Amino acid sequence: MTTPQRNRPFVFNTKEIQNILPHRYPFLLLDRIIHMNLEESEIIGVKNVTVNEPFFQGHFPGIPIMPGVLILEALAQTGGILVHQKGYIKKIAVLLNVTNAKFRKPVQPGDVLHLHAKGLHISATGGKIGAKAMIGDLLAAEAELSFALVDKDQL
């Protein structure tokens, strides 16, 4: 488990995130972690959305909107960090189910997504998180994400 340094807020930068998640470009969608409360099973990550994202070339030319499935993936990656920090360090959370997904506001270049995840249930075999993506005070997307925990050496 990674521990925060003294005299700095609890933050994981991109390099620390890469030590936890197996994702890499172009599918590492989490830039940093700015808040974590393990007792409350809460975490907040950040995704800086830039015009240089490869998906904007085709979704949609002239009207760039971040695909909803990638917003859900960014939320799932945030939840994956939470699960890891809850002690499941030799496992990877694999997405099983998405329920109650709603997309409330288009995400466009220049937006900063704050990715909130709350562990609703986490066990040695899997669990569920409640997640929401915010742009400032505006809700961009929300969903419940269920996952299985798989041993890293089984993948």
Image (spheres, rainbow, N blue to C red):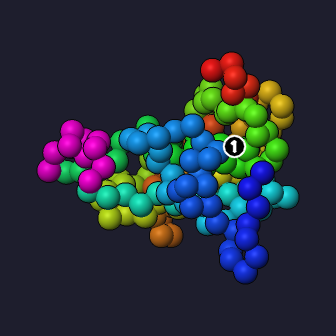
Image: 97 above or below 14: above
Numbered range of the magenta stretch: 52-62
Q: Using residue 150 as the reference point, say whether residue 26 is left or right of it.
A: left
Q: Nearer the viewer, residue 12 or 19?
A: 19
Q: Nearer the viewer, residue 44 or 19?
A: 19
**Residue depicted at 72% across the width and 37% down the height:** 128
Q: Main secondary structure of the magenta part?
A: loop
Amino acid type shown at disc 1: Ile
Q: Using residue 27 as the reference point, say whether residue 37 is left or right of it.
A: right
- For label 1, the crowd category at 10 Å Cα-Cα, with few meaning under 14, some 14 to 19 and many 20 or more, is many
Image: 110 above or below 1: below
User: Residue 152's spot in the image, x, y percent?
Assistant: 69, 27
User: Residue 57's spot in the image, x, y percent?
Assistant: 20, 43
> Any magenta on residue 47?
no
User: Residue 130's spot in the image, x, y percent?
Assistant: 66, 46
**Residue depicted at 79% across the width and 39% down the height:** 88
Q: Quadrant of the C terminus?
A: top right
Image: 64 above or below 146: below
Please name the residue that numbered disc 1 is placed on: 129
**Residue depicted at 47% across the width and 48% down the height:** 29
Q: Nearer the viewer, residue 56 or 144?
A: 56
